[in-house]
């Protein structure tokens, strides 16, 4: 269950932010989890012309290939943010944090499916 927060400089249209959300969700589904993905795109206070972005991903540990998954997600998210919001590669931060399974509760109080059912194979 990746919970993803994408913080971008203020001033973009709601339509564009929704499009970013959809594309980031697709990137997560190719790199970390195929379902139970929750993405929030938020505007942050920034200087005029700021081209930075902060992406935080909270998820359960144990998928394997964590470094490769993080690198693949970084590449995909950078491509999305560059093309849609003109994000500067040197100003993109990706933070992947792992929390124990007991910290995640969904669907009215149920537990998440096993990681083997949710984790995609990396190309």
Image (spheres, rainbow, N blue to C red):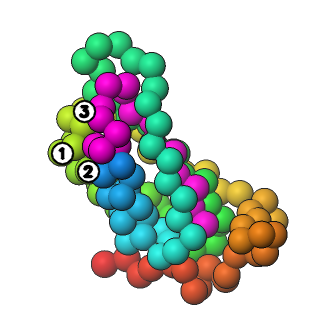
Locate the N terminus by quadrant: bottom right
Disc number placed over residue 67 in the picture, else none: none
* Residues at discs 2 and 1 in contact (Cβ within 8 Å): yes
Residue indicated by mark 2 = 80
Find the residue positioned furthest to the bottom. Answer: 117
**Residue 67 point in image, percent of width and height:** 46, 61
Q: Can residue 64 be seen by looking at this rendering?
A: no
Disc number placed over residue 83 in the picture, else none: 1
From the viewer's perspective, is residue 34 above or below residue 68?
below
Observer-nearest of 46 and 75:
46
**Residue 89 point in image, percent of width and height:** 26, 37
Observer-nearest of 121 and 110:
110
Any magenta on residue 36? Answer: no
Residue indicated by mark 3 = 88
The quadrant holding residue 7 is: top left
SS for dot 2: helix
> Residue placed at 32% from the left, 25% from the top?
11
SS for dot 3: loop
Locate the C terminus by quadrant: bottom left
Q: Which residues are magenta?
A: 1-17
> Residue placed at 22% from the left, 43% from the top?
84
Q: CA distance from mark 1 to mark 3?
A: 10 Å
Any magenta on residue 2? Answer: yes
Number of numbered markers: 3
Q: CA distance from mark 2 to mark 3?
A: 11 Å
**Residue 28 point in image, percent of width and height:** 43, 64
**Residue 29 point in image, percent of width and height:** 42, 70
Q: CA distance from mark 2 to mark 1?
A: 5 Å
The quadrant holding residue 118 is: bottom right
């Amino acid at each position: 269950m990746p919970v993803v927060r994408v913080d971008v400089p203020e001033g973009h249209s709601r339509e564009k932010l929704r499009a970013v959300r959809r594309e980031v969700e697709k990137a997560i589904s190719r790199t970390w989890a195929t379902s139970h993905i929750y993405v929030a795109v938020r505007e942050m206070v920034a200087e005029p012309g700021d081209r930075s972005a902060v992406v935080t991903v909270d998820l359960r540990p144990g998928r394997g290939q964590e470094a490769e998954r993080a690198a693949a997600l970084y590449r995909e998210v950078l491509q999305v943010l560059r093309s849609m919001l003109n994000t500067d590669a040197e100003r993109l931060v990706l933070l992947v944090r792992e929390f124990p399974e007991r910290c995640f509760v969904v669907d009215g109080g149920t537990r998440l499916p096993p990681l083997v059912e949710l984790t995609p194979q990396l190309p």
